[in-house]
Image: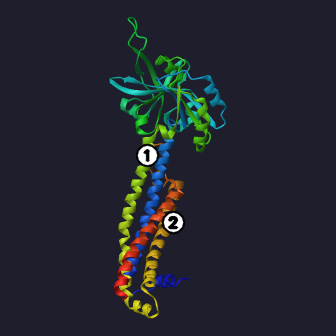
């Protein structure tokens, strides 16, 4: 056992001349522990929210998307569709037609995005998990229906049991002297879904055939949405599909489609981490006070160490190790406490979101190992810095 560690450990647990030093040492450990556990808990909650947002948008954010290079609609090549059908890494693919339109209900008129999909879309994309009212149904008998976002429904003031239908309008491309300038169709809602605010406030899901007829794009679609069996193989599958994508099409992954969304999540998490780190830095001033008072309390011991042949570097090492022990003790307590709270929240949902129509009932948490490693590294670095410079200054000043 190194001499500096042995002496520092004795100093940490031994009784000092001034009882205030013991109290400040305990406060230092508690301060580091609270800061560390706060980092673990807040970042884990942030990870949980990020994961929830990604899951809620997965129905609208496939792993890969193939779109026409030009124009809104296109009849996709049969060779490409065959390649998608036979690829072992593709779990499902969905032809989609998507376009802006207007919806009117009573006196309210709003712009919306109509997304025409097949009946299997909700099951294969797990959109069914986001249905908060009703049942996903696009057609019942000969009657077409729509699944609309919860935010849009609230803005229009509609529910699932309407006496009058929603009316949709879209410009008629084949307008003439005897035809209307607008295509007009009416639909009743069958279900409401919840997602990110900007998605649920504008999307209406309808039957693919109905949407093709409404937009005047028979046998044409806007894009093909692809979902993989293993999202970790995203880059590999993208490379394997590249030979089937000629200049008529464009192949993009979910990160390219949502650059702003993923960049925002990373920047927000970094901002939260830095803010909490700054708070921990302020709390580390307790370590500076504790070590400084300990050196003053043990000023007589410095002469003894000098007489035993120690130089200033060895003496500095003793008190620096003392500060490191305080930091490590606080960090370990904080990590255990923060992790335990997150595990309890994940298992039992102790802190709920309150009343309201939410996908989940309690705050989501997710512990990420890389976050724990970054927290440990940051806490130890702050503790080392907080103890090293004051110790060096005081020892060089007192041990002459």
Q: Position of residue 229 (x, y in %)?
A: 62, 40
Asked if 24 appears above or below 64 in the picture, the reply is below
Residue 27 appearing in the image: no
Q: Position of residue 269 (x, y in %)?
A: 43, 52
Task: Looking at the picture, tell me which residue is in the foreground, 121 or 261.
Answer: 261
Q: Secondary structure at mark 1?
A: helix
User: CB of mark 1 within 8 Å of CB of mark 2?
Assistant: no
Specify whether 239 is left or right of 50.
right
**Image quarter (top left, top right, bottom left or bottom right) of the N terminus:** bottom right
Which residue does the image show at 61% across and 41% down from the upper left? Answer: 236
Q: Position of residue 3 (x, y in %)?
A: 51, 85
Q: For the residue carrying disc 1, how many other residues have a C-alpha within 10 Å: few (<14), some (14-19), or many (20+)?
A: few
**Image quarter (top left, top right, bottom left or bottom right) of the C terminus:** bottom left
Residue 156 appearing in the image: yes
Front tag of 1 and 2: 1
Task: Looking at the picture, tell me which residue is in the foreground, 133 or 212.
Answer: 212
Asked if 251 appears above or below 76 in the picture, the reply is below
User: Alpha carbon of mark 1 to alpha carbon of mark 2: how far?
Assistant: 31 Å
Task: Looking at the picture, tell me which residue is in the foreground, 175 or 56.
Answer: 175
Asked if 253 appears above or below 279 in the picture, the reply is above
Q: For the residue carrying disc 2, how many other residues have a C-alpha within 10 Å: few (<14), some (14-19), or many (20+)?
A: some
Q: Position of residue 267 (x, y in %)?
A: 41, 50
Which residue does the image show at 40% across and 71% down from the upper left? Answer: 385
Which residue does the image show at 44% across and 94% down from the upper left? Answer: 307
Residue placed furthest toward the bottom: 307
Q: Which residue is mark 2?
A: 336
Q: Secondary structure at mark 2?
A: helix
Q: What is the basis of the colouring in this image?
A: rainbow
Q: Which residue is mark 1?
A: 263
């Amino acid at each position: 056992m190194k001499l500096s560690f042995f002496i520092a450990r004795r100093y940490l647990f031994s009784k000092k001349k001034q009882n205030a030093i013991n109290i400040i040492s305990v406060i230092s450990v508690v301060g580091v522990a609270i800061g560390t556990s706060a980092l673990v808990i807040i970042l884990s909650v942030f990870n949980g929210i990020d994961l929830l947002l990604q899951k809620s948008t997965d129905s609208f954010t496939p792993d890969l998307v193939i779109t026409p290079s030009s124009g809104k609609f296109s009849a996709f090549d049969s060779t490409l569709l065959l390649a998608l059908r036979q690829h072992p890494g593709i779990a499902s693919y969905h032809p989609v037609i998507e376009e802006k339109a207007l919806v009117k209900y009573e006196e309210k008129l709003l712009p919306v995005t109509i997304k025409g999909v097949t009946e299997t879309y909700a099951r294969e994309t797990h959109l069914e998990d986001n249905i908060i009212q009703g049942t996903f149904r696009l057609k019942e008998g000969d009657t077409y229906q729509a699944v609309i976002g919860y935010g849009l429904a609230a803005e229009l003031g509609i529910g699932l049991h309407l006496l009058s239908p929603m009316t949709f309008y879209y410009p008629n491309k084949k307008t003439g002297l005897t035809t209307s300038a607008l295509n007009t169709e009416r639909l009743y809602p069958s279900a409401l879904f919840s997602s990110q605010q900007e998605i649920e406030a504008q999307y209406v899901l309808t039957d693919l055939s109905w949407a093709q007829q409404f937009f005047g794009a028979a046998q044409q679609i806007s894009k093909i949405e692809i979902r993989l069996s293993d999202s970790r193989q995203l880059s590999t599958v993208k490379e394997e599909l590249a030979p089937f994508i000629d200049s008529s099409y464009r192949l993009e992954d979910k990160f390219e489609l949502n650059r702003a969304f993923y960049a925002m999540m990373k920047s927000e998490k970094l901002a939260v981490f830095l803010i909490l780190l700054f708070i921990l830095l302020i709390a580390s001033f307790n370590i500076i006070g504790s070590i400084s008072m300990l050196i003053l309390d043990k000023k007589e011991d410095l002469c003894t160490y000098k007489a035993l042949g120690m130089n200033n570097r060895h003496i500095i090492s003793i008190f620096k190790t003392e500060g490191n022990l305080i930091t490590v003790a606080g960090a370990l307590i904080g990590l255990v406490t923060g992790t335990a709270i997150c595990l309890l929240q994940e298992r039992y949902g102790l802190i709920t979101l309150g009343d309201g129509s939410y996908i989940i009932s309690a705050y989501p948490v997710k512990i990420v190992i890389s976050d724990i490693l970054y927290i440990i590294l940051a806490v130890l670095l702050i503790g080392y810095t907080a103890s090293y410079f004051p110790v060096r200054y005081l020892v060089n000043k007192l041990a002459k």
